[in-house]
Amino acid sequence: MNFVFLSPHFPPNFYRFCVELRRAGATVLGIADAPFDDLRPELRGALHEYYRVGDMNDYGQLVRALGHFTNRHGKLDRIDSLNEHWLETEARLRTDFNLDGVRVERILDWKKKSRMKATYRAAGIRVARGAVPHSLAEAQVLVGETGFPVVAKPDIGVGAMATWKLHDQAELASFFAGKPPVDYIIEEFIRGRIFSFDGLTDRDGELVFCTGHVYSQGIMETVNEDRDVFYHSFREVPADLEEAGRRTARAFGVRERFFHFEFFRSDDDGKLTALEVNMRPPGGLTMDMFNYANDFDLYRGWAELQVNGRFSERWSRPYHCGYVGRKDGKPYVHSHEEIVAHLGTKLVHQERIQSVFRPAIGDQGYLVRSTREEDILEAARYIHLKR
């Protein structure tokens, strides 16, 4: 199998996908704009060939790179990055080079939040009321139905960058006066906690792995209010979350892919409302959380699925695993050294986070695991305690 991996060095922990692809028997071909010598040694060793482009956003350069690989290695079989930013680029390349996987005609169903709603509704899953208004007048009509507050976010976008909570007509008018020149969806604000249903499907769309997480607050609040972030996995996924997640996977036709589906659990009635789908692994260190929570290797499992069409990793969620992020400059009570000593064997990993991720997940990340959920919650309280 000739597997082309876009931007294999980013996010930093994703180099392991290439390592495991090579171990599974694939010819791994990388494309990125970084100098080859700047790649970590394990990644350099995993790549059979690397093509450096001057600009990853220049489609012509990517086409020439794939043409070069075809000339050197024969027909290409797969292309991926497992990165939200490149989903549309991958789809276009798959279409132009006749490769397996999602193509141009389907990708906007996965990228546009407004189009996601139609698929959710067809699957019988509740969605927040909202639409893409193209003028202040249209937005005022919409808000007349939903009431304030509302959330304005790019119709195509990831995370909470350029996302705003609007509380009244003055803020709505101010938003439209300075709105970037892209489509924004405006939705009713759902008071509740964010839950995710995460997993991996095989070539037939069957789930070979799934789990769920609960978040301390939304990413919008984390970014816009510079809050600390904490989220953790379940050992037993709530039944309604798993049902909604499985229906979502079927409705969106997820095949041979990771997914990260987000839902609100409403404070008003306790029921789930669909937020959005992401057809790639969840961000940050969540891939590593999967592994620590299950004592398996999902990087390897994914690679075997790509190359051999089978998934042989065994899992049973023996642990809860939590991510606790801290941001520099906040008056935390406990030092890093005290955290390491206090948590002991419950602390399974810690690292400095690249600055580009800082607004969402912090400058320092800690992964903690335990068979008991209360241990995870106590660890988060200890790490986040402030003077």
Image (tube, rainbow, N blue to C red):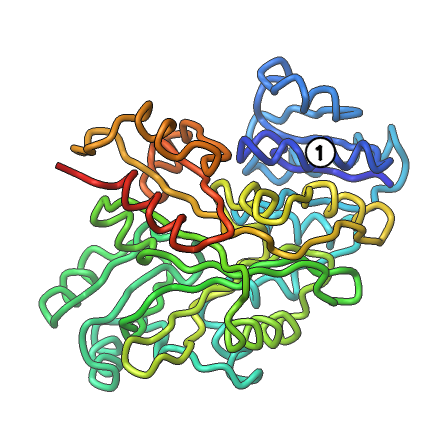
Q: Does 353 sit above or below residue 113?
A: above
* Location of the N terminus (image quadrant): top right
The residue at which mark 1 appears reads as 18
Give the x, y percent position of residue 276: 46, 66
The amino acid at mark 1 is: Cys
What x and y, as percent, mark residue 282? 52, 50
The residue located at (72%, 60%) in the rendering is 208
- Observer-nearest residue: 383 or 341? 341
Q: How many numbered circles does the render carry?
A: 1
Frontmost residue, 347 versus 260 = 347
- Name the secondary structure under disc 1: helix
Residue at x-position 57% and y-position 77%: 243
Instruction: Please indicate whether residue 126 sits to the left or right of residue 37 in the image.
Output: left
**Viewer-proximal residue, 121 or 138?**
121
Q: Residue at x 28, y 40 (%)?
A: 382
Which image quarter is the C terminus in?
top left
Residue 354: percent from left, percent from top:
42, 29
